[in-house]
Amino acid sequence: MPNSETSSLSGTVTKRDVRSAMWRHLITLQWSWNYERMQALGYLWSMLPILKKVYTDRNDLIQAMKRHLQFYNTNPQIGSPPIFGATVALESEKLGDAVDSLKVGLMGPFAGIGDTIQGVLIRPMIAVFAASLALAGSWIGSALMFLMGLVWCILMVPLFYLGYRRGIGFVDEVVGGGLIDRITEIATIFGVMVVGGFVPSIMTNLKTPLSFHKTVELAGKATTKTISLQDTLDKIFPSLFPVLVVALAYWLMKRFKLSPVWVLLILVVLAFITSAIGLF
């Protein structure tokens, strides 16, 4: 593509217009979030620099704006930038119908991918590590959380240009090539591994105070020795109780189809009962 700031892209859209739309989307997409159409108004505001150049007729511009006011919601950092980039490329070619199909078809799957990567993989790992540093009195913990947010913002730029350069082919590559299924499967497997690895550290205080006494003879004298059940279990099966709690939660959801909220309530009740009787 030409390097000039005002060189024409697809007839009337310039590189400056594309950058303006990108920065609007990256910064203001969530500013006007609402319960009726969620990110739609922010999406329209971001697309206006492109629409005003492409649709010079007032009625055509109004219709294009109405199209982008339809319900839209996806992950703002990972899911929306490539979708928005592809729609910018398509709107530059006046492919309005393709734009609508692309947004509707990708916002759901990309929300799942983005939320899984952020909420299940990266954020828990960074948050647990940062929290441990903060508890130790280090300022690096809070700085790490800020740095993570900054990285997400920076990542939005190349994701936007990925969608912009692929255009309509982006849908074929992502959906037709099975990319979403592969990413979701890999992210799910890795997420389960990560969360499972954090279980012992998160539930490190789940220990039993139970102990039993045994009388032994040492040097001809009877001596009573106290044996801690927790210490014995740690030698045989470390973190046994955290594993059992997770297994119980999984069994309740799988066997009785309970929601996570009900499982949490059951675990809270069990925690009170077992604490009252001195089991934990």
Image (spheres, rainbow, N blue to C red):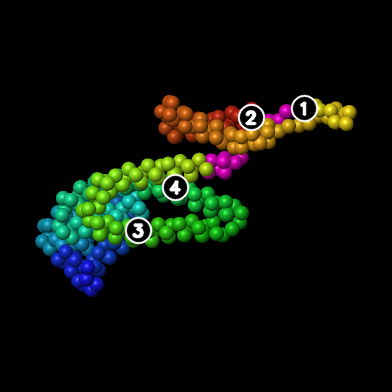
Distance (Cα) linking label 4 and label 3: 18 Å
Kind of residue at badge 1: Lys
Kind of residue at badge 4: Leu
Q: Quadrant of residue 141?
A: bottom right
Query: Nearer the viewer's eye, disc 2 or disc 3?
Result: 3
**Mark 2 highlights which residue?**
279
Distance (Cα) linking label 4 and label 2: 33 Å
Distance (Cα) linking label 2 and label 3: 50 Å
**Mark 4 highlights which residue?**
121
Distance (Cα) linking label 1 and label 4: 47 Å
Number of residues whose C-alpha sits closer than 10 Å to that of mark 4, classed few (under 14), some (14–19) or many (20 or more): many
**Disc on res. 214:** 1
Which circle's residue, 4 or 3, is located before the other in the chain? 4
Percent across and percent down for residue 57 are 10, 61
Which circle's residue, 4 or 2, is located before the other in the chain? 4
Q: Are marks 2 and 1 in contact (CB under 8 Å)?
A: no
Kind of residue at badge 3: Met
Number of residues whose C-alpha sits closer than 10 Å to that of mark 1, classed few (under 14), some (14–19) or many (20 or more): few
Q: Are marks 4 and 3 in contact (CB under 8 Å)?
A: no
Residue drawn where x is 36% and y is 46% of the image: 183
Q: Secondary structure at mark 4?
A: helix
Q: Which residues are magenta?
A: 198-214
**Mark 3 highlights which residue?**
156
Q: Is 112 situated above or below 272?
A: below
Q: Nearer the viewer, residue 100 or 10?
A: 10
**Disc on res. 230:** none
Which corner quadrant holds the N terminus? Answer: bottom left
Percent across and percent down for residue 274 are 60, 29
Residue drawn where x is 11% and y is 57% of the image: 59
Q: Nearer the viewer, residue 188 or 108?
A: 188
